[in-house]
Amino acid sequence: MARYISFLLFALLILPSCQSDNEKQNKRPNIVFLISEDNSMHYMDLFDPMGVSTPQIQTLAEEGVVFENAFSNAPVCSVARSTLITGTLAPRTAMHMHRKIQMAPMPEGLEMFPAYLRKAGYYTTNNQKKDYNAIEADDVWDESSGTATWRNRPESQLPFFHKETFMGSHESRLHFDPEIMKTYSPADDPADVSVYPYYPDTDMFRFTIAYHRDRIRDIDVWVGEVIQQLREDNLLDDTFIFYFGDHGGVLPGSKGYLYETGLHIPLVVYIPENYRHLVDHLPGTRSKGFVSFIDFPATVLNLAGLPIPEAMDGKAFLGKNLRESVEKRDETLGYADRFDEKYETVRSLRKGKWKYIRSYQPFYPDALHNNYRYKMAAFSEWRELYYQNKLDSMQAKFFQPKPAEMLFDVEDDPLELHNLAQKPEHQGTLSDMRKRLNGKLLEHRDLGLIPESILLKEGIDNPVSYGEKMAETLGKILQINDLVFHPFEEVNATLEENLRNGNTLEKFWTLNTMSVLGPKVTALLPLVEQMAENEESLIRWKAVECLAIAGNRSPFLALKQLIAESDDPVESLLMLNSLVYFKDHSGHHYPFTEDDINPGASITEVERRIQYLKGTW
């Protein structure tokens, strides 16, 4: 009996600690996303020696992991955030156009990832930006507002997921009146800042760079404030904190483009004391493994101990039971399509040190007008200097046609200044990267290869299913686009056959390919002239574009007529993209008047183009 009583007393003494250990194992961690607008990793000294010191973010890094190769899959807000909230590649799910003309449904069998957390007992809050191109269900957030915080949860023991966005670094902050240069003194003397070689070295650019560096400092202050709130609430030991940028930018030529400055983001993940058993990395370390926005939802669910839906495209990079070591990952896909009213289809693939960029309308220069972009004084000055012939060859590239493909060694050339695509010694790498990219676009049924007007009519109700239905056609489109890499005499017969007997999409991309080939296709232009008169409006537009680029025929009257006749505003927007291109970047001239463009159908983006053409933007 004495031995039994002694055992019972011992059991009663250790039971609380056993329960505590069990509770600790079963308790889920809190997770916080701190997202800053429009800044790439190039602006912080945690990642780039020329960057700004960010001591608050540094404190996260000392107790966490710095991811040196983290990427947004898209270089603009709504597409990047759609990828981030769904864990899917936006061109596969029709969430790839910024700004959406029509919302896409969530793929069958998939929810926005905070909904899974909420169902598992998490309190989910968003403060406050969303900006998704997908239809959001009612069960994603407990609260989404400018005052949403974990502090509002009804019970203090509830685990929480909190997402917060810092707007003070957004592109709009650089839409300042140049008069501010007389009154604002940046922390860095503009005379001392580093100016990238593709920028003109002017007072305006130097001031803009210095002014933006102050916005990075503002980000750091904000991060520190949120850390202090968590510390005051005694939550730091239980909370993963992800700090990252929502994509690159926002100095000219970064946001909206698939260069590293548009995609390569800062990412620091703080590892809380009580959950270090979930992470293989030691605090204060750096990871070189590649991670991107498609991976973030899977990572959060994995840390929370929840299953990862099969419909997600990404893979977890933190937590237990990872599919592979993060350090072995060395690949990321990038995509850029419509940016407001500006169209251009571009894809990129980064594998290790190699960066491959494929432009499907390379005759459109990077500088093609977008009203919002050119509100930035530095952007407008850059263009004016080009028109005045005051830029060197490196600075002028932004305003000129691009190669259809570019290849960069970003270890030796981090600013992607030197295209290696034509170098004989790199042809093997170039061919491999082209094949890899094509394989991924076909594997993921990239709907960016479908003109938006067709996609909205045929596939927006169920984009994933539509992509599967169009798989064979998408493969043919990729083959047509790659004809530009062969001698014309080898592809002439194929081009003619497509023009005569192809379906709408085959004719569309064949005409586009001929525009890329330029004057080489002169022998086929009589057939194109017939198509400019007798085909459906979408094909007539591409025929007019081809005749202007490859045959030096003025496009303006034909484009004006097509825009006036079209009853599809998205189709009109596509045509207006060409009209602005020819107005600003070709040898063709036309005396536009205020009432010269009268679209048959209009939406906001069409109105932006009309405002620009009228000079009222």
Image: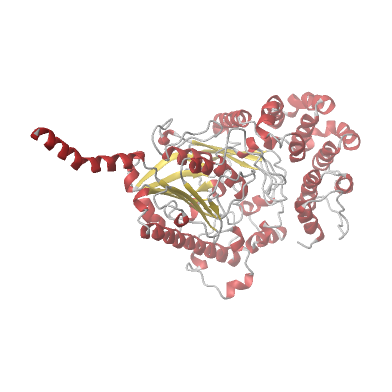
Q: Nearer the viewer, residue 580 or 386?
A: 580
Which quadrant: the N terminus?
top left
Q: Which residue lies at the image location 77% right of the left edge and 24% below the top edge?
A: 494
Q: Residue at x 87, y 31 (%)?
A: 527
Q: Answer with the quarter of the image where residue 11 lies.
A: top left
Residue 527's place in the image compared with 192, above or below, is above
Q: Quadrant of the C terminus?
A: bottom right
Q: Is residue 534 above or below residue 375?
A: above
Q: With 287 as the anchor, is 208 left or right in this view?
A: right
Q: Quadrant of residue 319?
A: top left
Nearer to us in this view, 54 or 100: 100
The figure's colour scheme reads secondary structure
Q: Is residue 240 above or below residue 406?
A: below
The furthest residue to the left? 2
Asked whether residue 74 appears in the rendered view, the answer is: yes
Picture mark count: 0
Q: Is residue 390 visible?
A: no
Residue at the spot x=56%, y=75% of the render?
183
Q: Residue at x 79, y 37 (%)?
A: 519
Relative horizontal placement of residue 458, taking residue 534 as reference (left or right): left
| Residue ranking furthest to the bottom | 183
Tell me residue 421's x, y (percent).
Answer: 60, 37
Q: Is residue 563 above or below residue 229?
A: above
Percent of width and height locating residue 20: 28, 43
| Residue 595 spot, x, y in % from top left | 88, 58
Question: Foreground: 51 or 454?
Answer: 454
Whole-percent x, y for residue 580 in the image = 78, 51
